[in-house]
Amino acid sequence: MNTDNNPYASLLGIEVVEVSAGMARVKTRVAPQHTNHLGYTHGGFLYSVADYAFELASNSHGIDAVGLTTSMEFHRPSTVGTALEAVAREIHLGKNIATYHIEVMAENKRIASFTGTVYRKS
Amino acid sequence: MNTDNNPYASLLGIEVVEVSAGMARVKTRVAPQHTNHLGYTHGGFLYSVADYAFELASNSHGIDAVGLTTSMEFHRPSTVGTALEAVAREIHLGKNIATYHIEVMAENKRIASFTGTVYRKS
Amino acid sequence: MNTDNNPYASLLGIEVVEVSAGMARVKTRVAPQHTNHLGYTHGGFLYSVADYAFELASNSHGIDAVGLTTSMEFHRPSTVGTALEAVAREIHLGKNIATYHIEVMAENKRIASFTGTVYRKS
Amino acid sequence: MNTDNNPYASLLGIEVVEVSAGMARVKTRVAPQHTNHLGYTHGGFLYSVADYAFELASNSHGIDAVGLTTSMEFHRPSTVGTALEAVAREIHLGKNIATYHIEVMAENKRIASFTGTVYRKS
């Protein structure tokens, strides 16, 4: 997987920090265009940050993996200027199916939690 | 809620079609910047489309509602040029908590399904 | 699928009402052994009722289907004596993956909502 | 919370191992009445084991907590005789809302993963 070529991540300003077998770390900073009408970081942006880490981690084994289902819990609001980091780790790797936990952090505070399951094309 | 003033929806090119009590409909068209490294619509973009309908429907009663948890299922891939529509409908409205089902459609085909639960600030 | 031979459904007293292609309906009545320490119906029991409808609907096509992921939202409490019905309907049927919505009802009130995704063994 | 008085947990044979602030551990052994028509542990039973740990952990702070939403991922099948343990840990504790991760293990193998969010009655 060429992690330098993700148009959606580029649009949102999410950068890859680290990818290894079954894990990935990405980072970004909340900008005005990432907020909702109340001035808080939009849930869709937080999801996209987590989802990018999920995509990188689940494709890290050299087999194409496509997202099947995800769930997300939003714990705390954040605002413009906040530095965010999302870390994905593999909690189950099967032949056809794998599952990942992703946490979205802002300076040691957990902003949101994400769980994603992929189908692996063999 | 001022539906014309959502910076994140503007960045992604998602438009409001209709909002009424407990429901909302939004639309968009998949553009190159909404895709992943494989050329398919990014999961984070599909989520953001559904999430915007969720946000509008859950804030349609005049009480601020904040997203607590969401789950999403991805059914079919889509590509650049696809016209997408997301419709949110309320399946439970309680005093503090409400839940919505959102379906993301492309010309009568269901692309993805989303369920979201909000906390209502009273 | 032999719907008469499900030991777990028998233990909990959940009965099959109807099964057809992509749908299933089951029913039960909340008994004292289905409650938690507060006297309310246990979340695990409500899940089990929904899950049985999910299992029947997803196995209704003659291909073994195994549960991959589920999400559930609890809307209202219920107590001993309540008659419950769960209805599963198919929202996507793919070659390898299918998804179902299940609603748990008590006399026209929605008690809980459930979404489940299966892997179909081909 | 009186952990000795849970009728549903008694019916299913799930025992409390340990409860402390924000965490809980329960155990059980899969019996014939916990299986589905294929002889595998029923998803509803696995959920109930995880849900009991979730209930104990979320009520461990002396404030009544009620389940709002849960998601579960099933990783591996298990059969009659398997010793199961579920451990709940708190990943976010807010004033009104808290979230928990629960893992269901069988001798160091992860059988299933569960995430649950509660509303805390203040």
Image: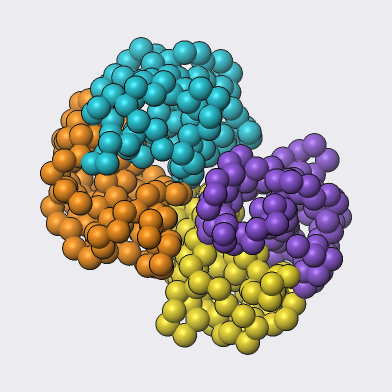
Chain colours: A purple, B yellow, C orange, D cyan
Residue A36 relative to residue B75: left or right: right
Camera-nearest residue between D109 and C54: D109
Residue A33 showing in the rendered view: no
Residue B41 picture quarter:
bottom right
Residue C43 picture quarter:
top left
Q: Is residue C120 above or below residue A37?
A: above
Residue found at x 69% / y 82%: B31
Residue B34 in percent (x, y) is at 70, 75
**For the C terminus of chain C, which image quadrant?**
bottom left
Residue found at x 18% / y 63%: C20
Residue C18 in percent (x, y) is at 14, 57
Residue C75 relative to residue C56: left or right: right
Residue A60 relative to residue C29: left or right: right
Residue found at x 32% / y 15%: D5
Camera-nearest residue between D63 and B89: B89
Residue B105 in percent (x, y) is at 48, 77
